[in-house]
Amino acid sequence: MRARGALAYAVSLLAFLCAGLWLGGHPATLPEPLREPFVGPSAGLSAEAAEVIEDTYYRPVGEAELGNASLQGMVRELRRRHRDRFTEYFSPESLASFNETIEGRFSGVGLSVVPVRRGLRAVQVFPDSPARRAGISPGDTVVSVDGASIAGESSNEATAKIKGPEGTEVVLGVRDGKTGTVRRLQVTRAEVALPNVSGEVETVDGRRLGYVRMLSFSEGAHALLAEAVRKVERGGAEGIVLDLRANPGGLLDEAVLCAGIFLPEGKVVARTESRTEGDATHETVGDPVTRLPLVLLIDRGSASAAEILAAALADNTGAKVVGTRSFGKGVFQQEEPLSNGGALKLTVGEYFTPDGVNLARSRGIHPDVKVSDDRKTPADEGKERALRVLAGQVGN
């Protein structure tokens, strides 16, 4: 009976301790003999340090602030140790901003950017946007936000600082892409809808050619791309230049659906390998929208889903690639929600082109026809060359 009573007491004590932890008790405050079963050395040390900072630091520090800093520290270590530029921590605020961009809308200044050492380089300035009205041009680099440097920050951290409620103001330090001088610009944020896909027909060497530009792979991008392709076909296009320059990518599913606009059902778009998610082959579904000849236009800003689509079309159709080499992103991420309303965007695997190439190892897609834009001229040399290449194919 005594043994049974002792066992019941132990079970009750354990249940009481677990309940206390569940209801919000801090594991670091447990007696030393009981702390170790509940908290590992690393977690216990972090909790202890956080408690010391809260109690001792010369300015008030909130629990959420320390939690965010701890998560950022873990992510920075992963990025440093594994040379992973893409794993990120999103605070609740930055996660909301990121999701708005994926949905194709946000409140900000109207820039499409790529990360560089100094900050964020503008690759496109949207028409009738606050950035356009402030005089920012493609090639300029945002180096500071509200007086604080953004050098070395992840693109999502930096862009989250630029975005904000419609009607609010932000001061941007902008380095001129031609002169190198830095200007301080006060910009009023506005609601911006991404002009994600556009299409037009141009005549080159007597041939009517479709020119379709795609800026990202946000939700519903495949439907917009299909409509742009139909539009240029209705306009008499004999072939299509698909411009993926400065396209940072987006959703893998959208890249697969976009490939199906040009490829028949069952064609491999990409293969993925992951320690935790398993291996998968992503193939097209349904019937293609067009079978017109195709030329792809890329540059160093073409990344992720843009590279997946470009490689899939080149590998499966032999389409010529024009421009400069692409970004070279050969890994993919998965968003894991956290209890504070934020999320971790973790690199969880690698992807491979239909020909089995990992674009990180190959340092991107290398074009068949190399051409880069001269920022000192008003002409778009990449577009002009791609259209001439397509005109030659159609003529033959």
Image (spheres, rainbow, N blue to C red):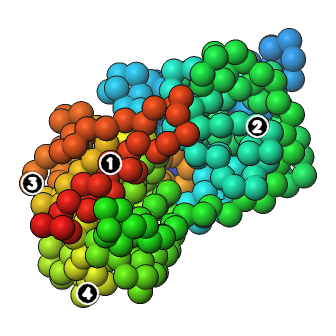
Q: Are marks 4 and 3 in contact (CB under 8 Å)?
A: no
Badge 1 marks a residue whose secondary structure is helix
- State how far apart marks 3 and 2 are (Cα): 43 Å
Percent of width and height locating residue 384:
38, 50
Q: Nearer the viewer, mark 1 or mark 4?
A: 1
Q: Return the residue nearer the eye: 57 or 270.
A: 270
Residue 173: x percent and y percent? 75, 24
- Amino acid carrying label 1: it is Arg
Q: Secondary structure at mark 4?
A: loop
Q: Which residue is mark 2?
A: 135
Gap in Å between the C-alphas at discs 4 and 3?
A: 22 Å
Name the residue nearer the viewer: 185 or 84: 185
Q: Residues within 10 Å of mark 4 (few under 14, many from 20)?
A: few
Which residue has dot 4 on it?
Answer: 286
Pointer 1 residue: 385
Helix, strand or loop status at disc 2: loop
Q: Earlier in the sequence, mark 3 or mark 1?
A: 3
Q: Amino acid at mark 4?
A: Gly
Tell me the tag on residue 355.
3
